[in-house]
């Protein structure tokens, strides 16, 4: 027997309780029960218009429905995929062929080839890309040819108009297509990631796992009048994101980007980026972004969330804690865990149920039973042979056998007690690990630093991940009051005015120079002398 390891893709348990989007109030919420919702978000919800008990009850029902949808997502998605594979007839079968270079823009192929060549560096790669923002590290690159965009759009529209079941592309968009359900993951998205995006992103974003991408989630989103028109500000459940405009003719709908989501003023000066058909925007998953309202026409975009388990296995980007892994379909949410499997070296077949502790115990108990049976057989045969020779020898051998049997029984009891004790200890350890993750707030930045220092078997946390932990830490009432009591002096660069701002934006006072103060007084009292003379009758 030999032991081999295989990877299992998972999701984090926070998927069913964190980042629940409520478009009506423009909020992402954490939800476990009504009491927690009122405690954590009561004032904020009231400020967004959730005032009456009816409003709150409607919100509660909406959140409970979304949690239920997320829990059923894996099996329902697998069922849709199987039905589509067996009954759907595509309009453009050529789209389902393995990805060819002819479908790609020559500039994209050249950039990927350069990135994978010996001696390639970031400076050389940036000469082949458009730098949208050096500060935000956002880049634009042509990805698909115009002909391929048109063919893919025709297939997507044909599928949309069919009676096939369709899943939501993500937790915020309502209209679009999941690429893995349509069967386009293997022929299109996976080779795009492995052959072209991986070498390119290894140079652009090495600290975000750009060179360790091992899974993705790809979907097409559709914006049209009467459907989704815009997308609220958010960040992606991905280390990196590629967003490619496929068409059609439209106006508006530009992307806007802020800073990384944990920055307090991340959207003070957003950067707007217009779509160009066939071209893709590359950015970090933690970059705050959204989409402006569509003006006219229809907009279709292919979005690929690129994931690296080496990065996210240490820190879930959505709850900013060490992930609590739950088995999932396909690539899951990009988290992985190793599963050991026992391989029979004689026939080289993998036992499907092996790798669990229970099965190992079964093998141990089976071996023990066979050994004990062999011992009993040996003892019985020896006692029968001795009885034929003499009765005295028979009695002595049987007494020896009883002593040995008694010793063996005691040994068996001790082993059984030891196994039970070990199982109880492991159950306690599991309870200690699982309970705090569900009931208590996540670790602070200092705690994570300490744990990161103790555990050196993986990549070091990036500054972005550390900031995410600090940003997601719950704020107490005292911290909120302290934040609102801070008074800042802010200068308006356009007018030159200086204001005293309290907390998040309450204007206390405007500060002006002496010269400006005199000018204001002059303007305020201009004509006062003339009015006084007229009232006093000094003027005709």
Image (spheres, rainbow, N blue to C red):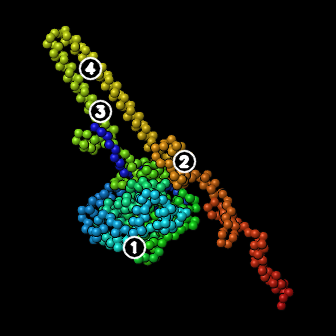
Q: Marks 1 and 2: CB-CB under 8 Å?
A: no
Query: Residue at label 1?
Result: 247
Whole-number angstrom distance, CA of label 2 to CA of label 4:
58 Å
Q: Is residue 445 visible?
A: yes
Which quarter of the figure has residue 344? Answer: top left
Q: Earlier in the sequence, mark 1 or mark 2?
A: 1
Q: Earlier in the sequence, mark 1 or mark 4?
A: 1
Mark 3 near mark 4, Cβ–Cβ under 8 Å? Answer: no
Separation of marks 1 and 4 at Cα, in angstroms: 82 Å
User: Can you tell which of label 1 and label 4 is closer to the viewer?
Assistant: 1
Residue at image point 86% right, 87% down: 538
Tell me, yes or no, whether the two marked residues, 1 and 4, touch with CB atoms within 8 Å: no
> Mark 3 falls on what kind of element?
helix
Q: Quadrant of residue 213?
A: bottom left
- Residue located beneath label 4 in the image: 405
Please tell me the numbered disc located at residue 364.
Answer: 3
In which quadrant is the N terminus drawn? Answer: top left
- State yes or no: discs 2 and 4 in contact (Cβ < 8 Å): no
The residue singled out by tag 2 in the image is: 444
Asked if the residue at tag 3 contacts the one at tag 2, i.e. Cβ–Cβ closer than 8 Å, the answer is no
Mark toward the start of the polypeptide (2 vs 3)? 3
Q: Dot 1 lies on which element? A: strand
């Amino acid at each position: 027997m030999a032991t081999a390891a295989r990877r299992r893709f998972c999701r984090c348990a926070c998927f069913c309780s964190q980042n629940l989007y409520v478009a009506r109030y423009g909020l992402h919420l954490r939800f476990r029960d009504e009491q927690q919702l009122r405690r954590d978000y009561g004032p904020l919800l009231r400020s967004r218009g959730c005032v009456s008990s009816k409003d709150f009850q409607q919100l509660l029902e909406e959140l409970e429905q979304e949690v239920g949808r997320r829990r059923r997502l894996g099996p329902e998605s697998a069922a849709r995929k199987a039905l589509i594979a067996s009954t759907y007839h595509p309009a453009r079968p050529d789209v389902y062929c393995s990805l060819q270079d002819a479908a790609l823009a020559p500039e994209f192929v050249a950039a990927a080839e350069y990135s994978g060549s010996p001696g390639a560096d970031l400076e050389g790669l940036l000469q082949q890309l458009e730098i949208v923002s050096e500060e935000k590290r956002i880049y634009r690159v042509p990805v698909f040819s115009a002909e391929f965009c048109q063919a893919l759009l025709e297939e997507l529209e044909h599928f949309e108009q069919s009676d096939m079941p369709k899943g939501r592309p993500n937790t915020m968009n309502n209209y679009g297509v999941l690429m893995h359900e349509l069967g386009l993951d293997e022929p299109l998205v996976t080779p795009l990631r492995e052959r072209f995006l991986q070498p390119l992103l290894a140079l652009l974003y090495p600290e975000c796992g750009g060179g360790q991408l091992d899974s993705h989630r790809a979907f097409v989103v559709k914006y049209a009048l009467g459907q989704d028109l815009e997308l609220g500000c958010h960040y992606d459940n991905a280390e990196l994101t590629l967003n490619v405009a496929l068409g059609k003719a439209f106006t508006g709908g530009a992307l806007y980007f802020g800073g990384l989501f944990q920055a307090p003023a991340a959207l003070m000066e957003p950067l707007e980026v217009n779509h160009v058909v066939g071209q893709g925007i590359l950015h970090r998953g933690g970059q705050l972004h959204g989409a402006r309202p569509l003006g006219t026409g229809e907009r279709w975009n292919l979005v690929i969330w690129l994931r690296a388990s080496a990065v996210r296995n240490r820190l879930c980007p959505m709850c900013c804690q060490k992930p609590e892994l739950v088995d999932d379909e396909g690539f899951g949410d990009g988290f992985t865990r190793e599963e050991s499997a026992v391989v029979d070296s004689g026939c080289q077949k993998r036992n499907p149920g092996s790798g669990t502790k229970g099965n190992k115990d079964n093998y141990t108990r089976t071996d023990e039973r066979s050994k004990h049976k062999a011992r009993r057989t040996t003892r019985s045969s020896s006692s029968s042979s001795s009885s034929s020779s003499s009765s005295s020898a028979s009695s002595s051998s049987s007494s020896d056998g009883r002593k040995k049997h008694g010793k063996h029984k005691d040994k068996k009891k001790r082993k059984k007690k030891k196994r039970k004790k070990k199982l109880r200890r492991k159950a306690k350890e599991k309870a200690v690990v699982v309970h705090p993750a569900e009931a208590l707030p996540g670790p602070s930045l200092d705690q994570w630093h300490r744990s990161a220092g103790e555990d050196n078997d993986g990549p070091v946390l990036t500054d972005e991940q550390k900031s995410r932990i600090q940003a997601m830490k719950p704020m107490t009432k005292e911290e909120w009051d302290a934040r609102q009591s801070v008074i800042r002096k802010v200068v308006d660069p356009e007018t030159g005015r200086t204001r005293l701002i309290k907390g998040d934006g309450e204007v206390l006072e405007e500060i002006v120079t002496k010269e400006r103060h005199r000018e204001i007084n002059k303007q305020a009292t201009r004509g006062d002398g003339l009015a006084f003379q007229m009232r006093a009758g000094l003027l005709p």
